[in-house]
Image (cartoon, grey):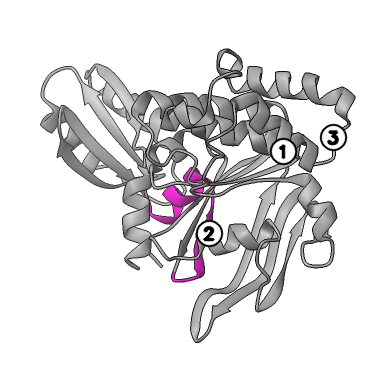
């Protein structure tokens, strides 16, 4: 089921096109990583979906409801975390969350239990009586996540939630997002830390100059860039001799020595592991490992946004 969708979403700021005909689909229960250069249109897209901006044209949908026509209902379903949000320095953590629980209309008799639950989920229980302005940057980011979870939204739209965090805090945020996915939340997240999105996202969307240039899985990116057909092979003995044997196969497009072994590029439609292993074993060469070449999101982003791949 599609939980988040845009159709022809376009936004102009004066003569500047921040978004141009953006068509996007995010399935229920998925984590969707939204990446692009600064000014590419990520934040604009997220603000439109969170009902904070109106598009110039086009439509956005949350759970089948058009954002523009159903603002109040959509806001009940969405938890939006901006890239930076100031906190109320004169409040304690519990008071801060109680304020937002009241703002969302939670019944007074239920607020204590709900706040206790989100504090536990975000590992902030021990900080419940701490002043908000005394929290570390990582703790403040967790507090913002606790805030957007107060009304138990189905959809989380998170703009750079790991921005400015140290490595430990980023790991903690990543694990929390994985836990939220297990709870059935649909998560749209933007980040410049591409390696972390690669590890936890079901799908990736790459946007540049307001246009979506790719949307799909890492496997689909690899296929588009021709890396799904490449494997790295390590053998006992001379890798050059083994490489020469494989070069003679019609199913092999290319073999290049690389590091402690060699990379094999297979012809379209061929499956590599079995063919390579059988050929080398028959030739009396012991195979140590055959590992599919993994495309790094950083590399895909650089190549796709430079227009190298079409």
Give yes or no for contact between labels 1 and 3 (Cβ–Cβ under 8 Å): no
What separation in Å lies between label 1 and label 3 (alpha carbons)? 9 Å
Asked whether residue 64 is in view, the answer is no
Quarter where residue 263 is shown: top left
* Span colored in magenta: 209-226
Residue nearer the viewer, 140 or 166: 140
Residue 34 place in picture, x, y as percent: 51, 52
108, above or below 255, in the image: above
Residue nearer the viewer, 255 or 28: 28
Judge left or right: residue 160 versus residue 227. right
Judge left or right: residue 293 versus residue 213. left
Residue 203 place in picture, x, y as percent: 56, 46
Q: Which residue is mark 2?
A: 43
Which quadrant is the C terminus positioned in? bottom left
For discs 1 and 2, the disc positioned in front in the rendered view: 1
Secondary element at image label 3: loop
Secondary element at image label 1: helix
Secondary element at image label 2: helix
Judge left or right: residue 281 versus residue 13. left
What separation in Å lies between label 2 and label 3 (alpha carbons)? 28 Å
Report if residue 41 lies within the magenta region.
no
Report if residue 220 lies within the magenta region.
yes
Of callouts 1 and 3, which one flags the residue occurring earlier in the amino acid sequence?
1
Residue at 48% x, 24% y: name it.
Answer: 172
Of callouts 2 and 3, which one flags the residue occurring earlier in the amino acid sequence?
2
Residue 106 numbered mark, or none:
3
């Amino acid at each position: 089921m599609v939980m988040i969708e845009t159709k022809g979403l376009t936004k102009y700021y004066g003569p500047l096109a921040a978004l141009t005909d953006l068509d996007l689909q995010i399935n229920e229960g998925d984590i969707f990583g939204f990446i692009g250069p600064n000014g590419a249109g990520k934040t604009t897209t997220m603000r439109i979906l969170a009902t904070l901006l109106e598009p110039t044209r086009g439509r956005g949908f949350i759970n089948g409801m058009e954002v523009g026509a159903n603002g109040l209902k959509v806001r009940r379903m969405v938890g939006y975390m901006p890239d930076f949000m100031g906190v109320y320095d004169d409040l304690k953590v519990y008071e801060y969350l109680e304020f937002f629980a009241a703002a969302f209309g939670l019944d007074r008799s239920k607020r204590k239990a709900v706040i206790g639950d989100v504090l536990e989920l975000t590992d902030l229980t021990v900080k419940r009586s701490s002043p908000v302005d005394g929290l570390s940057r990582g703790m403040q980011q967790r507090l913002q996540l606790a805030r957007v979870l107060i009304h138990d939204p189905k959809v989380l739209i998170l703009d750079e939630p790991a921005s400015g965090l140290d490595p430990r805090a980023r790991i903690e945020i990543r694990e929390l997002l994985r836990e939220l996915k297990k709870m059935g939340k649909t998560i749209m997240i933007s980040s410049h830390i591409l390696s972390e999105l690669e590890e936890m996202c079901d799908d990736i969307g790459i946007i540049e100059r307001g246009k979506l240039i790719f949307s799909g899985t890492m496997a689909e990116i690899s296929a588009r860039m021709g890396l799904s057909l490449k494997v790295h092979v390590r053998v006992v003995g001379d890798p050059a001799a083994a490489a020469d044997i494989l070069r003679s196969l019609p199913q092999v497009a290319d073999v290049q020595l690389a590091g402690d072994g060699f990379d094999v590029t297979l012809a379209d439609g061929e499956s590599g592991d079995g063919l390579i292993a059988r050929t080398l074993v028959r030739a009396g060469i012991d195979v140590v490992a055959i590992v599919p070449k993994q495309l790094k999101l950083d590399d895909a982003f650089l190549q796709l946004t430079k227009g190298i791949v079409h």
